[in-house]
Image (cartoon, helix red, strand yellow):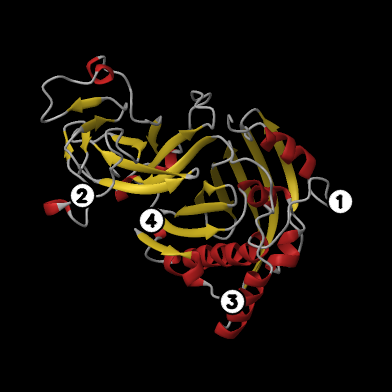
């Protein structure tokens, strides 16, 4: 598996231009949000399965807070709030023989490095090594440490985020091609980006056919075969005409989104490619995008190294181009649209179901 960043693959600025742009950004800095929308709720990716071995604990930052992801000795992935309810130590960092790693995992529990208190993935305190009388809430088996609903599917660790702590209302779908060691589909090729925008601004690209020509330089504006919005699912298909040395090849881009954070994109035509395109809110206007590409195993050492890599490179280039827009654009509640624009109103109505204001 390869892990890299889109920014490293496609740098588009000279150091002088970047320096001047940075100076200008400092001059016009403001506390006014560019997109005054709450972070969306739903299922979101926090890690890939291969990043978390048995007994590992990894600190992460999402949803405007610090969390710890750990894997129990039985192999289950768990996610809890970062700070021990005892005296506030961070649960994601070990000391002594664990320095440079996470703290100890004992059975189904993570051990606080400060005083050795242990917490399971449901937020219950399972052990206090020096206590003769347990605190009442511990004795009652209450969930004290914040614990998160977790699903591990498609080689990804997902958590459910809701600002009002409401329970999951749907389950993430299993993508057959994304199974580990699939006989017909190869290993994931992973690229990631830190993007300074709200997730809705990124999602709107999925219904914006016109931008492909102007931002990405495609010869034609892709034709939308259909775009459907049904509950927490959004589906769409664009018909493409892809130039090659042997002539134009008809192809398609089919997208299926589950809520605001999970999407699977199937590219057909020149070379079949599956993309798990997941985005997770780090904060209201900061998003972590993690793209896992999967291509046919039978040709990964032949066409995969040429045509397959070129397709992935092109998509990464498009992300770099999109990021120039996303990092700087202003959200307009009532944009000035024309008849050639995509179904932005339908997309925003669909996306609005995930925008829940946090409890004051």
Q: Is residue 273 in view?
A: no
**Residue 55 visible, this angle:** yes
Q: The residue tagged with tag 3: helix, strand or loop?
A: loop
First in residue order: circle 4 vs circle 1:
4
**249 in relation to 187, above or below:** below
Label 4: how many Cα within 10 Å (few below 14, some 14–19, many 20+)? few
- Give the CA separation, mark 2 to mark 4: 43 Å
Marks 3 and 1, how far apart at CA: 29 Å
Say which quadrant the N terminus sits in.
Answer: bottom left
Q: Residue at x 50, y 53 (%)?
A: 288
Q: Which residue is mark 2?
A: 94
Give the CA distance from mark 3 to mark 4. Answer: 34 Å
Q: Position of residue 11 (x, y in %)?
A: 54, 75
Kindly identify which numbered label has been placed on residue 12: 3
Q: In the rendered structure, which disc, 3 or 1, sits on the residue that comes first in sequence?
A: 3
Q: Nearer the viewer, mark 3 or mark 2?
A: 2
Q: Residue furthest right?
A: 339
Q: Is 14 placed left or right of 309 in the picture?
A: right
Q: Residues within 10 Å of mark 2 (few under 14, many from 20)?
A: some
Q: Earlier in the sequence, mark 3 or mark 4?
A: 3
Query: In terms of image quadrants, where is residue 74?
Result: top left
Split into 4 quadrants, where in the image is the C terminus?
Answer: top right
In this image, 211 relative to 96: left or right?
right
Can you tell which mark lies on residue 298? 4
**Mark found first going from the N terminus, 3 or 2:** 3
**Residue 293 image offset from top left, x and y in percent:** 46, 54
Q: Nearer the viewer, residue 315 or 45?
A: 45
Q: Which residue is mark 1?
A: 337
């Amino acid at each position: 598996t390869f892990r890299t960043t889109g920014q490293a693959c496609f740098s588009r600025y000279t150091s002088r231009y970047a320096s001047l742009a940075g100076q200008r950004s400092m001059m016009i800095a403001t506390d006014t949000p560019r997109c005054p929308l709450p972070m969306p709720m739903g299922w979101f990716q926090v890690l890939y399965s291969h990043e978390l071995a048995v007994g590992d604990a990894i600190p992460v930052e999402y949803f405007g807070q610090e969390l710890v992801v750990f894997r129990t000795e039985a192999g289950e992935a768990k996610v809890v709030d970062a700070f021990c309810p005892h005296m506030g130590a961070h649960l994601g960092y070990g000391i002594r023989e664990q320095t440079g790693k996470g703290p100890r995992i004992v059975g189904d529990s993570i051990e606080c490095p400060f005083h050795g208190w242990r917490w399971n993935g449901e937020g219950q305190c399972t052990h206090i090594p020096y206590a003769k009388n347990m605190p009442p809430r511990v004795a009652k088996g209450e969930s004290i440490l914040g614990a998160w609903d977790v699903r591990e599917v498609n080689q990804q660790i997902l958590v459910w985020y809701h600002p009002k702590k409401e329970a999951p209302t749907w389950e993430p779908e299993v993508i057959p091609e994304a199974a580990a060691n699939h006989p017909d589909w190869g290993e994931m090729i992973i690229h990631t980006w830190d993007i300074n925008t709200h997730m809705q601004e990124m999602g709107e690209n999925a219904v914006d056919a016109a931008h492909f020509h102007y931002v990405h330089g495609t010869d034609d504006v892709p034709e939308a075969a259909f775009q459907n919005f049904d509950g927490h699912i959004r589906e769409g298909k664009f018909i493409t005409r892809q130039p090659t040395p042997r002539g134009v090849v008809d192809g398609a881009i089919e997208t299926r989104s589950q809520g605001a954070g999970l999407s699977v994109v199937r590219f057909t035509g020149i070379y079949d490619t599956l993309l798990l395109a997941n985005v997770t809110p780090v904060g209201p206007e900061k998003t972590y995008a993690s793209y896992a590409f999967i291509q046919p195993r039978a040709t990964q050492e032949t066409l995969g190294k040429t045509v397959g890599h070129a397709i992935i490179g092109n998509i990464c280039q498009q992300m770099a181009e999109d990021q120039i827009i996303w990092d700087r654009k202003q959200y307009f509640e009532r944009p000035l649209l024309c008849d050639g624009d995509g179904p932005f109103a339908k997309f925003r109505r669909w996306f609005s179901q995930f925008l829940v204001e946090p409890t004051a």
